[in-house]
Image: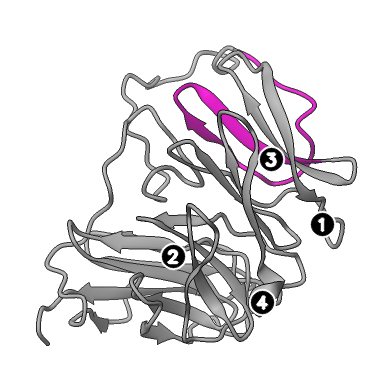
């Protein structure tokens, strides 16, 4: 799709170049990988598939139902699923054997019930947003609950299909989208306490936020039911916004950034929009 020609000036942040954090190539610590780009640094992949497809290495059962993807860190696979009336975090080894399971909170049983968030692994901590709005931090070694918060207690209101985002880790913060009067918030990843609450109310939909950054600066971009929001991760201040796709039935895809362009597309006949991002210092 051709770009709309809109220019977003990040003069406040003073970015000169925008990129993603480098991580180990063999880790996939959360939703859509280390940079939320869906790109893997793995090499040696098959260029053609054998007849019948690649051989099945393993499969796992007993992990519950839902729409969760996987995180893979140091050979351990983390995912979530609804088991009975509970949302459970499951950890599996590289043969598919379940190492442990831990209850995160209640299962989401409303429209299209099931798990709807991917765990995010940061160091020895696992962060997860439940469909009903419970945000948790678990210790990966002991499986113990470190802290928990409720998005509804932060002024939030979920969409009809529940909270469906995967938390974003930016430095020492956990970024989540309660929606409502609060919009987007940052929690201390060690304690779960408020770091800031954003200044842009919005409707929570079904996207997960991304971060655009260089070596010293960053910008959080999230798709919401009220459009695109871009916030300064230091204090939650709105840097800019776009009302494209505001009021759409369901805004689900994440915004995507590459080589100076920010793209966002949505269904229900809405289409997409592309911004040319210009990083100007002192403008």
**Prevailing SS of the magenta stretch:** loop
Quadrant of image for the N terminus: bottom left
Quadrant of image for the C terminus: bottom left
Q: Which mark, residue 80? A: 3
Q: Is residue 18 magenta?
A: no
From what the image shows, is residue 70 above or below residue 48? below
Q: In front: 235, or 162?
A: 235
Q: Secondary structure at mark 1?
A: loop
Residues drawn in magenta: 58-82
Q: Where residue 122 appears, x then y in whole percent? A: 45, 42
Q: Where residue 275 appears, x then y in whole percent? A: 31, 75
Q: Where residue 277 appears, x then y in whole percent? A: 24, 74
Eye-nearest disc, 2 or 3? 3
Q: Which residue is mark 1?
A: 112
Give left or right: position of 273 versus 160.
Answer: left
Eye-nearest disc, 1 or 3? 3
Q: Which residue is mark 4?
A: 156
Q: Which residue is mark 2?
A: 255
Rounded to the nearest angstrom, the CA distance separating label 2 from label 3 is 23 Å
Q: Earlier in the sequence, mark 1 or mark 3?
A: 3
Q: Quadrant of residue 263?
A: bottom left
Q: Is residue 69 magenta?
A: yes
Q: Secondary structure at mark 3?
A: strand
Categorize mark 4 by other alpha carbons within 10 Å: few (<14), some (14-19), many (20+). Answer: many
Categorize mark 1 by other alpha carbons within 10 Å: few (<14), some (14-19), many (20+). Answer: few
């Amino acid at each position: 799709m051709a770009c709309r020609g809109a220019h977003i000036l990040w003069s406040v942040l003073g970015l000169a170049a925008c990129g993603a954090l480098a991580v180990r190539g063999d880790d996939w610590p959360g939703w859509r990988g280390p940079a939320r780009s869906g790109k893997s640094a793995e090499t040696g992949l098959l260029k053609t598939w054998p007849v019948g497809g690649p051989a099945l290495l393993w499969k796992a059962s007993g992990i519950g139902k839902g729409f969760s993807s996987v995180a893979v860190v140091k050979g351990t696979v983390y995912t979530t699923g609804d088991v009975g009336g509970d949302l459970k975090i499951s950890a599996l080894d590289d043969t598919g054997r379940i190492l442990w399971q831990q209850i995160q909170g209640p299962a989401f049983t409303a429209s299209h019930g099931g798990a709807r968030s991917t765990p995010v692994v940061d160091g020895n901590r696992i962060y997860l947003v439940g469909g009903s709005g419970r945000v948790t931090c678990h210790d990966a070694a002991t499986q113990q609950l470190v802290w928990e918060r409720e998005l509804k207690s932060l002024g939030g209101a979920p969409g009809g299909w529940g909270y469906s985002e995967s938390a974003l880790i930016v430095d020492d913060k956990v970024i989540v989208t309660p929606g409502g009067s609060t919009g987007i918030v940052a929690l201390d990843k060690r304690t779960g306490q408020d770091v800031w609450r954003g200044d842009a109310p919005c409707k929570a939909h079904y996207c997960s936020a991304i971060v655009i950054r260089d070596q010293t600066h960053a910008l959080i971009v999230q798709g919401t039911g009220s459009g695109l929001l871009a916030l300064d991760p230091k204090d939650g201040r709105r840097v800019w916004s776009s009302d494209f796709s505001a009021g759409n039935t369901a805004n689900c895809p994440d915004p995507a950034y590459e080589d100076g362009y920010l793209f966002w597309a949505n269904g229900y006949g809405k289409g997409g929009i592309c911004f040319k991002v210009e990083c100007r210092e002192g403008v």
